[in-house]
Structures are given as C-alpha cells and as structure tokens.
Amino acid sequence: MSAVRVRVLMPRLLRNPAFWYAVSLTVAALVEDKISTDHLRRLMDWCSTNLANIRPGGHPVEAFVASAFIPQESAGVWPFFALSLFSVVAALGARRTVFLLAGVHIGVSMVTEGLVWWRIHHGTLPESEAHMWDTGPSYLVVTALTVAIATARPLWLRVVWAVCLAGATPSLLEGIDHADYTAIGHVLSFSIGIIAVLRTRRAHSAVDLEVVPEPVTVPATPQ
C-alpha cells in the first residue's frame, strides 16, 4: 500500500468507531493477561452489570460502560469478532451503529438482570446471583455479527462472520435449556440484529422507489 493511500485511509480509519472498539478490546485482552488473578477478580467484580452494581446504590453508569470493554472469558477472540463492526458502520453509518449497539448492550443487560431479580425474588435463584460476574461485549457483538452476515461487503466477508457466529453459538447458548439468563440475552441480541437488518432493507427499498426516474416524454417532431 502506497504512502499516499495510507494518508488517505488513516483519517477515515481514525473516525470509525469500529476501529477504536477493536483496539479497546485488544488492550483489554492484553491487560487481563498481564494483571494478577486478584486484580482481575476485582476488575470483574467492579465492571459486571450484575444486580449489586446496577442498583441505585451501586455504580450503574460505570458498570454499563466498562462491561462493554472487559471480556469475561476468551478475551483474545473478541477483538477479531469486533471487526464485524466495520461492516455494520458501512451499512448503518457510525452514529446509528453506536446507538444500536450501545442500546443492545444496555437494554439486553437490563432485561437479563431483570430476569435474575425475578428469579431471586421467587426463590428459584440464590441471593448470591446478584453478585455473579456478568461482563463482556458478547451481546453487542452478536448483534453486530448478525447485521454483518446480511450486509458485509465483499460477499466473502459474510461467510467469515457466519462461520464466526456459528462457531461461537454453542458457547453463547450454553444453558439455554435451563433458561440461563446469559443465553437468553444472546438470543435477544440475535433477534435485534435480524430486526435491524429488516428495517435497513425496508428503508433502502423505500429510497430506491422514491428515486425511480419518471419516463421522459419526447415531443413529437412536427412533420
């Protein structure tokens, strides 16, 4: 790649939120690998979006933000999966991508923790579940992969993201037969991705209909 092309592409790359998110997850993976087990445990305790942290007396804002950048397991895989956000940004635009994926991360986390609260309240989960680790980018990345599978360019990228999502699915859905709240969250994230794809295609279809040119009438040439 020539120096001129690098100078042209670099500003666009630096303005893309997908780039910064992938970099952030890479840094987080390196930090998790280097710090001690005790410090890692404290980090997970603090950034988890569990009931103890997101209650009014906890630190909900910090937990929701930090948890999107701190994988709970397989930290080295998530930066690669996060590259699917480039396809989402290309399809939806940077602002819509940020709003969509931030909304998925926060909304799905609130729904799953609501399920935890409900089950604790009705005695089907122990009180200790309010302090269980619940951190990582998986909810938003599942949505991103789903959108990328349907919209990525070139087409071979769709195959890459489909293979990634298919390979991760057994782990993502682990415990679904026992109504595991994390697995339910991943199903919700996938569903939101499907809805986002359908809405985007509908919007593009409407735009295409609006720009269809009217037939040009050529006046008859007088004889």
Image: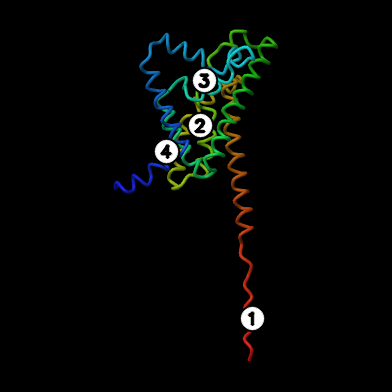
- The secondary structure type at the circle numbered 3 is loop
Image position, residue 46 (x, y; %): 51, 14
Alpha carbons under labels 2 and 3: distance apart = 13 Å
Check disc 4 and report the residue beneath it: 14
Left/right of residue 117 with respect to residue 162 in the rendered view: right
Alpha carbons under labels 4 and 2: distance apart = 20 Å
Looking at the rendered structure, the kind of residue marked 3 is: Thr
Check disc 2 and report the residue beneath it: 141
- The secondary structure type at the circle numbered 2 is helix
Alpha carbons under labels 1 and 2: distance apart = 57 Å
Q: Nearer the viewer, mark 3 or mark 1?
A: 1
Q: Along the polypeptide, which appears first: circle 1 or circle 2?
A: 2
Q: Nearer the viewer, mark 4 or mark 1?
A: 4
Q: Residues within 10 Å of mark 4 (few under 14, many from 20)?
A: few
Q: Residues within 10 Å of mark 3 (few under 14, many from 20)?
A: many
Q: Residue at x 61, y 62 (%)?
A: 212
